[in-house]
Image (cartoon, rainbow, N blue to C red):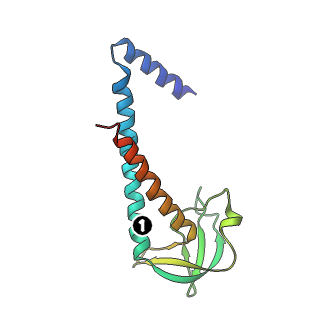
Amino acid sequence: MELLIIIAMGLIVLFMLGYTLWPLVSGVLFLAFMFAIVCELFFVISGILWLLARRRNAKYLGLSDDDGPANFAYYEIDGEEYRNIFPTDAFMRRFLYRKEEVNVRLWKRKKKSYVFDRVTTLVIGLGLISFSVIIVLLSAFVR
């Protein structure tokens, strides 16, 4: 609430100094546009890693509570334990993660290895589509 009051006071001071509303709105839209570009790059890189990952059969082991504020799903593939690349969704955990053998994609390099499960695949696809639409919409206002 205090942040909103500070922003409102700052806007009042800028209006008193003679600034109009459009440059301020344009600046906010530009920041939103840049944020959308960064998010789109994140999902593009995640999509490339997904494409490079190999399809494997895995057994869902469960969620970890010792990863800090985020919980990650863990899978067993060929006797080794691997962590999902994205944190889990707290809202629909029991619907999204089942205790059965599932098809996942495993990206494995020397020290890093990540699992892309069906939820991660859905998040990457929705992220690419939604941020592409947001970038197109914001590009009409940012010049």
- Residue at left 39%, top 34%? 28
| Closer to the camera in the image, 40 or 107 | 40
99 sits left or right of 133 in the view: right
Residue 42 sits above or below residue 142 on the image? below
Q: Report x, y in % for residue 75.
A: 59, 77
- The residue that mark 1 highlights is 47
**Secondary structure state at the residue bearing disc 1:** helix
103 sits left or right of 37 in the view: right
Total marks in image: 1
Residue 69 sits above or below residue 105 on the image? above
Q: Report x, y in % for residue 11.
A: 43, 20
Amino acid marked by disc 1: Gly
* Residue sitting farthest toward the bottom: 78
| Closer to the camera in the image, 1 or 58 | 58
Residue 32 sits above or below residue 124 on the image? above
Mark 1 crowd level (few <14, some 14–19, many ≥20, 10 Å Cα): some
Location of the N terminus by quadrant is top right
58 sits left or right of 31 in the view: right
- Residue at left 33%, top 13%? 18
Q: Report x, y in % for residue 92.
A: 68, 60
- Residue at left 56%, top 62%? 87
Location of the C terminus by quadrant is top left
- Residue at left 60%, top 69%? 73
Residue 21 sits above or below residue 59 on the image? above
Picture quadrant of residue 98: bottom right
* Residue sitting farthest toward the left: 143
Q: Report x, y in % for residue 17.
A: 34, 13
| Closer to the camera in the image, 70 or 124 | 124
